[in-house]
Image (tube, rainbow, N blue to C red):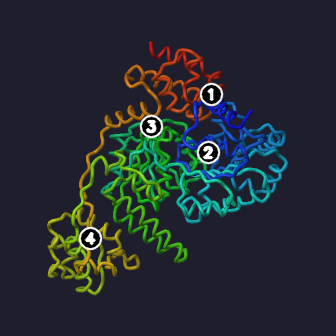
Amino acid sequence: MQAGLRADQILRDVFGYPAFRGQQRDIVSHVAEGGDALVLMPTGGGKSLCFQIPALVRDGMGVVVSPLIALMHDQVAALGEAGVRAAALNSSMTWADVQSVERRARQGEIDLLYVAPERLLTERCLDLLAASKLALFAIDEAHCVSQWGHDFRPEYIRLAVLAERFPGVPRIALTATADALTRKEIIERLHLQNAREFVSSFDRPNIRYRIAEKVSARKQLLEFIRSEHAGEAGIVYCLSRNTVDETAEFLAGHGVNALPYHAGLDSSTRELNQNRFIREDGVVMVATIAFGMGIDKPDVRFVAHIDLPKSIEGYYQETGRAGRDGLPADAWMVYGLADVVQQRWMIDQSEGDASYKRIISTKLDAILGLCETTACRRVTLLDYFDEPSKPCDNCDNCITPPQEWDGTDAARKLMSCIFRCEQASGFSFGAQQIVDVLRGKSTQKVLQFGHERLSTFGIGADLDATQWRSVLRQLVMLGLVKVDHERFNTLRLTEASREVLRGQRRLSLRRQVARPVSRRNERKDRTRVAANGVIGVAADAGAANITVFEALRGWRRDVAKEHGVPAYTIFHDSTLHELAGTLPRSLDELRSISGIGATKLERYGTALLEVMQRAAE
């Protein structure tokens, strides 16, 4: 049978999908025929099928380099449910289990073997692979090879040994996040100079992007979760371990099922919390960026940031963990001047050389530009990855267009105040003092330094403190004002400020206005629209369909508990939505439902029909 025809059959019979999406067919065909590939595809775009199907088409065992044990377990469990012979080798296994997997590999009884890069690089594992018939190597999360990235794993660099030791075995490197610099690193470090590149759209249209000024981050977060995502799964990212602990405790104290995750917790607690997040419904994980890579949970309904990410790559990677099932999801973030100050300080204190600091500073400028832009967030985000796009009508700037104003005079007032305060006292001051002087506040500190006698005292009374902080934040972003970390985060003018002070440059700034809070019923409308467009639920789906869907979820939860696997390895929510919307009445009709392959049809078909019939009565 030709590789293409066999791939179509495997897609339909094993995984239960009627057709390939986007570039999947081209990638599968290329790798199945022995070609190397670099695949850039957004989270939820179907990367796994791009190596799983070629591994099943080709003779031998596919070897998947995976960075996390939890991901291996989930992938192996999902493949087992689909009838694929999959196994893993990792440090959580007993010696007897390791020996069993190795024996099966040598005997050709494994279709897909998942291995951590650390284990793969051992001589024992390399000898095992040399003694086995190999179909391909898949290097997942390939951006981990980049020393500029936030997920850098030094052992990934050593994976070039695969090209040297197994030159005839095709290799496919996959990632959801890679700018031009990272792509170049992946190609060079993994010896993929002859690989064909497949770059899919970075767009995740089901994700709504929202960014707001940080006022009281935890209270803002709680209101967002309560009003829009009560009882739903989500991830909250924080910069420090202390912030993770305090935020998780705050949310839990207000009735949110929230758990912490960071490297400071003991391994058993981290594993317990991660397993609860993966296997239970409605858990909110509060975490540092150490959490999330490789998490395959499809029904994460929101990703929130209460601290500014370090780069757009990091932001995209983290927000991409929401809505992997194609249903509506939210990427929500609050940030403020303190975030900018902290990130600048971290760059200044880093041990990298000047080139490293310049690149990291450029990446920080890009994420600040995304935060402050008045244009469509999605257009700005995709433009960073060199992908042209049009306004999306699904971000805060499109839904409630921000106001722009000529902030030149305000900027000159603020910069003049910084200059006058320093000139009068002989040293510089922080943001609070400058804002108080501008607004004419006779505080103890203002009177102590005689700043009430300055010409700039009270000249900014027309703006409130929040508005002045917004102006200052944008001036810092534009490089007109610098925060001096060595002098207690005081403010200094830069050389670039001269043009504005002399009237040679005008500034258009973003006006800080309160945005209306999105209502939960609006989100339900989004869910219905997305379901109609992506999944195929009938347009008139009503209460009866909801009842069937909930009955299917309950049945799935019981089966998953019985099998000891996450619920989504049985069926994704999208499959349950389609079942509830179409209500198939026979096994033949079930064959047309996306996500139900031959093994799952045989295993669960009759039970599904019974559950739907009872719920619809």
In the rendered structure, find residue 151 and report the number of the disc placed on it: none
Q: Earlier in the sequence, mark 3 or mark 2?
A: 2
Q: Which residue is mark 1?
A: 597
Q: Which-is-in-front pick, marks 4 and 1? A: 1
Q: Is residue 10 above or below residue 485?
A: above
Residue corresponding to mark 3: 327
Which secondary structure lies at badge 4? helix
| Marks 4 & 1, CB-CB < 8 Å contact | no
Q: Residue at x 61, y 22 (%)?
A: 604
Is tag 4's residue or tag 1's residue first in the polypeptide sequence? 4
Query: What is the quadrant of residue 435 in the picture?
Result: bottom left
**Measured Cα–Cα span from mark 4 to mark 1:** 62 Å
Foreground mark, 3 or 4, reads 3
What percent of the width, then of the height, locates residue 268? 60, 48
Nearer the observer: mark 4 or 2; the answer is: 2
Viewport quadrant of the N terminus: top right
| Residue that label 4 marks | 432
Read off the residue under disc 2: 71
